[in-house]
Image (cartoon, rainbow, N blue to C red):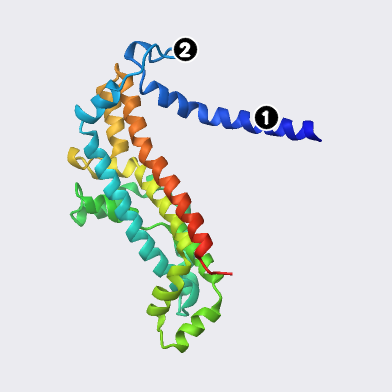
Amino acid sequence: MRSRVRGKALLAYLVALLTVAPLLWLLLAAFRPESELYSATWPSSLTLDNVRYVLTEVPFLRYLANSAFVSAAVTAVALLLHSMAAYALARMHFRGRGIAFATIIATLLISLPVILVPLFLVVRTLGMVDTYAGLIVPGVFNAFGIFLLRQFYLGVPRELEDAAQLDGCGHWRTYWHVVLPLSRPMLAALAVLFFLTNWNSFLWPLVVAQDESLRVVQVGIASLQGQYASKQHYVIAAALVAAVPTVLVFLFGQRKLIDSLKTTGLK
């Protein structure tokens, strides 16, 4: 029995090592000298020149700031609007509610490349090309977030809402003071998901923003691959810098998710 457990543990450690190995190589390669970039051995010395060059000689800090602003704005607006839509679909009775929900879910079957051209035409008509609004507004809608929150709200005990209505609360106050605080675990999970999705977005920012001052981090890394094709150590350093915020957001969001589960009060 012990040998079987040890074998499973060894297999788990092996799988974990294979999963983390590319990340470890990226971390090490970002600090290698250019001459030892593709060497399979431990580098003779580590240097900060690659990261320093990316942060000082390339407008990479601008790319990071653009990605952070767009991702944070999309996440904040999406969480508010999605929670309101999900609450209406879960708790309020109105004609066409089922059709509206089915239409929202149907959009999950449509990928971005399919609607890329008509979406760009709409954004151009509204005058949002080469603006932050063009980067933010199309990314707000996410059917998965509405679906997940609606399923969560269906599990909220109706006694809590009945008690709020007895105290004179309408739909808005019930949503804001009762339902929304109970949604913190789900909102924390969706916040991490939305932020990482928008941080890693590439196709839409590439299409809608031609102005270099609006370039996001993933488009910036792609442009570096063309400018520094013979100096891949700079591209690797840029990829490492771009990955740091995603790791921090994930770790912070994971902690907030656990804290929310402890204090949700939903049984």
Q: Position of residue 117 (x, y in %)?
A: 31, 47
Residue 78 makes an appearance in the image:
yes
Q: Position of residue 88 (x, y in %)?
A: 44, 73
- Amino acid type, label 2: Thr
Residue at image location 32% in from the left, 37% down from the top: 218
Mark 2 closeness class: few <14, some 14–19, many ≥20 residues within 10 Å:
few
Give the vertical position of 100 relative to 169 (above or below). above
Q: Which mark is residue 41?
A: 2
Residue at image location 42% in from the left, 26% down from the top: 26
The residue beneath circle 1 is 10
Q: Position of residue 262 (x, y in %)?
A: 53, 61
- Amino acid type, label 1: Leu
Examine the image and state in which quarter residue 56 appears: top left
Image quadrant containing the C terminus: bottom right
- Camera-nearest residue between 81 and 38: 38
Question: Dot 2: what SS?
Answer: loop
Q: Position of residue 204 (x, y in %)?
A: 31, 44
Residue 120 makes an appearance in the image:
no
Image quadrant containing the N terminus: top right
Which callout, 2 or 1, points at the residue further toward the start of the chain?
1
